[in-house]
Amino acid sequence: MEFDEVIISRKSVRSFLDREIPEEILNEMMEAVRLSPSFQNKQCWRFIVVKDKKIIKDLALRSGMISKVNFFIKDAPIVIVACADPAKSGMMNNQNYYLVDTAIAFQQMMLTAWNSGIGSCWLAAFNEQKVREILDIPNNIRVVAFSPFGYPKKKKTLYEKAVKTIAQSKKRKDIKKIVCFDKWSF
């Protein structure tokens, strides 16, 4: 795909085909992370690639902030958990840059995946402590986000349709409502 096609067509995917992700595509995704910019190039992020179906099912059933909100990830061939060590990043203007750094790297990974036809869905509604327990993540490491990855099913599930309706994920603000020039003018 052309770069603008990747940006325009990317969407959250919540239903996946039963098809493995080739190692070369997974390697491209990891290379996109490795090349991501970060605060003073400290590269504080760490990513856990979960392929074990039992662990994915455990994440699906126990990681949701509200009940089993993340149950849809159970069918994904892989789940990737984006973590960071805040001590290995920095703070500027009273902002913790480990969050920014990890978000940039994770987004680069997701766009790289989408370019190869692999869908994802950024998850934020998760119980960090449960994710730590399931994956043996130390307490000094923050779980920033995680996502299932896989080839999208053509037909949307009822759950996927409902979430898209509630989230209004296709609705985007007009550019004039999010961008101004020279000075704040909103």
Image (spheres, rainbow, N blue to C red):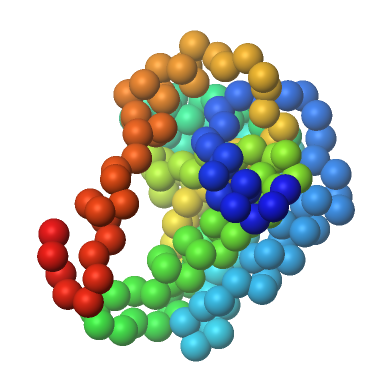
Residue 41 in the image: state x and y as whole percent: 55, 85
Q: Is residue 29 visible?
A: yes
Q: Residue at x 51, y 64 (%)?
A: 104
In the figure, residue 30 lies in which quadrant?
A: bottom right
Query: Total number of numbered labels?
Result: 0
| Residue found farthest to the left | 185
Q: Residue at x 13, y 59 (%)?
A: 186
Q: Residue at x 32, y 24 (%)?
A: 166
Residue 19 in the image: state x and y as whole percent: 80, 29
Residue 159 in the image: state x and y as whole percent: 47, 16
Q: Is residue 131 above or below residue 39?
A: above
Q: Is residue 34 above or below residue 118?
A: below
Q: Is residue 55 visible?
A: no
In the figure, residue 28 lies in which quadrant?
A: bottom right
| Residue found farthest to the top | 158
Q: Nearer the viewer, residue 5 or 112?
A: 5
Q: Is residue 129 above or below residue 104?
A: above
Q: Residue at x 35, y 34 (%)?
A: 171
Residue 147 in the image: state x and y as whole percent: 56, 43
Q: Is residue 21 above or below residue 25?
A: above
